[in-house]
């Protein structure tokens, strides 16, 4: 039970982080590179700010969970974010997944498991 | 399937290179943060002269900016998985700079991650990637293809 709480917190953090990436992606559309002032102003758009806030929030949850849990279990769980992002990209951004991309996600997760063992 | 109004542009090679650069920045940042937190002291003077900590935070910030620029030029489902490369860089940095031990399993992990991102790259070159890439009916009924170069 004590071990379960950090795991659930990390899963929640991957969820928030995945939505953070969605907002970073949305916000990146408003970027302009015309000049320094224009560039900085375009960075301060609503979507990017939401995205960065969600990222920071998920990092806080990660750090909190990592303090109390077993790293070799928690690190592989963080790669769940690749799965969420794949679904979100299809649902919210109209992107397409295919067999190669799903195989890639599976291999990456396997790799993260082995690298953090 | 309904067409997404703001479908992502096709992923350019430049965007993938930017994400890889981002992973290098954040991995170096992570190493500096680790060094910085090892000599963390609870007073302001020590905190603002903790160059490793400050350097780590700066590299993380830079990494975020590079990632956001990359995302503008490609699909999230292709670019995001490349972030997994940072696991490899962190492992290599841990060996050479922190003198940590790795086992054979870890190298198998490196191999799997490299295979994984290669598959993602391969998946990105198979059509169609976004609804924008599908042939559409033009106003007068003729089929046209969207411009597909890097944005």
Image: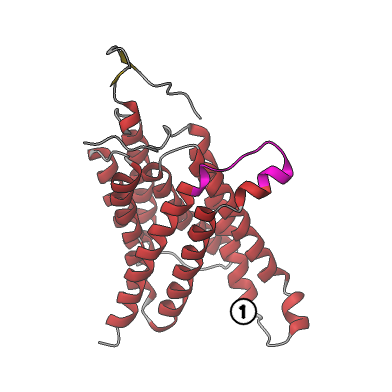
Asked which quadrant contains residue A34, the reply is top right
- At horizontal 38% and vertical 69% (from top left) the residue drawn is A13
B11 displayed left or right of B54: left
Q: Is residue B43 above or below residue B37?
A: below
Q: Quadrant of the N terminus of chain B?
A: top left
Q: Is residue A72 above or below residue B125?
A: below
Q: Is residue B75 above or below residue B91?
A: above
Residue that sits furthest to the front in the current view:
B140
| Magenta span includes B114 | no
Q: Position of residue A58 (x, y in %)?
A: 44, 68
- At horizontal 43% and vertical 34% (from top left) the residue drawn is B11
Color theme of the render:
secondary structure
User: Magenta residues?
Assistant: A27-39
- At horizontal 69% and vertical 68% (from top left) the residue drawn is B54
Q: Crowdedness of circle 1 by 10 Å Cα count: few (<14), some, many (20+)?
A: few
SS label for mark 1:
helix
Which residue bears the numbered disc 1?
B38
Q: Is residue B39 above or below residue B80?
A: below
Q: How many marks?
A: 1
- At horizontal 44% and vertical 64% (from top left) the residue drawn is B102
User: In which chain is the residue bearing label 1?
Assistant: B
Q: Nearer the viewer, residue A32 or B148?
A: A32
| Magenta span includes A34 | yes
Q: Position of residue B8 (x, y in %)?
A: 41, 37
Q: Position of residue B61 (x, y in %)?
A: 61, 58
Q: Position of residue A11 (x, y in %)?
A: 32, 69
Q: Nearer the viewer, residue B24 or B110?
A: B24
B57 displayed left or right of B103: right
């Amino acid at each position: 039970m004590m071990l379960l709480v950090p795991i659930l917190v990390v899963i929640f953090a991957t969820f928030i982080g995945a939505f953070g990436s969605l907002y970073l992606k949305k916000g990146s559309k408003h970027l302009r590179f015309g000049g320094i002032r224009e560039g900085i102003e375009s960075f301060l758009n609503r979507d990017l700010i939401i995205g960065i806030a969600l990222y920071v929030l998920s990092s806080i949850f990660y750090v909190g969970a990592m303090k109390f849990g077993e790293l070799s279990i928690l690190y592989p769980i963080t790669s769940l974010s690749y799965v969420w992002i794949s679904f979100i990209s299809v649902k919210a951004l109209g992107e397409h997944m295919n067999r190669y991309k799903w195989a890639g996600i599976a291999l990456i997760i396997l790799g993260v498991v082995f690298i953090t063992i | 399937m309904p067409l997404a109004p703001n479908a992502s542009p096709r992923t350019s090679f430049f965007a993938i290179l930017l994400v890889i650069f981002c992973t290098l920045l954040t991995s170096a940042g992570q190493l500096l943060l680790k060094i910085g937190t090892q000599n963390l002291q609870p007073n302001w003077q020590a905190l603002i002269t903790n160059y490793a900590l400050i350097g780590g935070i700066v590299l993380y910030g830079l990494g975020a900016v590079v990632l956001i620029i990359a995302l503008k030029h490609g699909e999230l489902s292709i670019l995001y998985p490349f972030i997994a490369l940072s696991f490899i860089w962190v492992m290599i940095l841990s060996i050479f700079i922190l003198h940590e031990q790795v086992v054979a399993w870890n190298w198998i992990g490196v191999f799997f991650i490299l295979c994984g991102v290669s598959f993602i790259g391969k998946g990105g070159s198979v059509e169609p990637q976004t609804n924008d890439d599908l042939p559409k009916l033009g106003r007068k009924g003729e089929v046209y293809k969207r411009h597909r170069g890097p944005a």
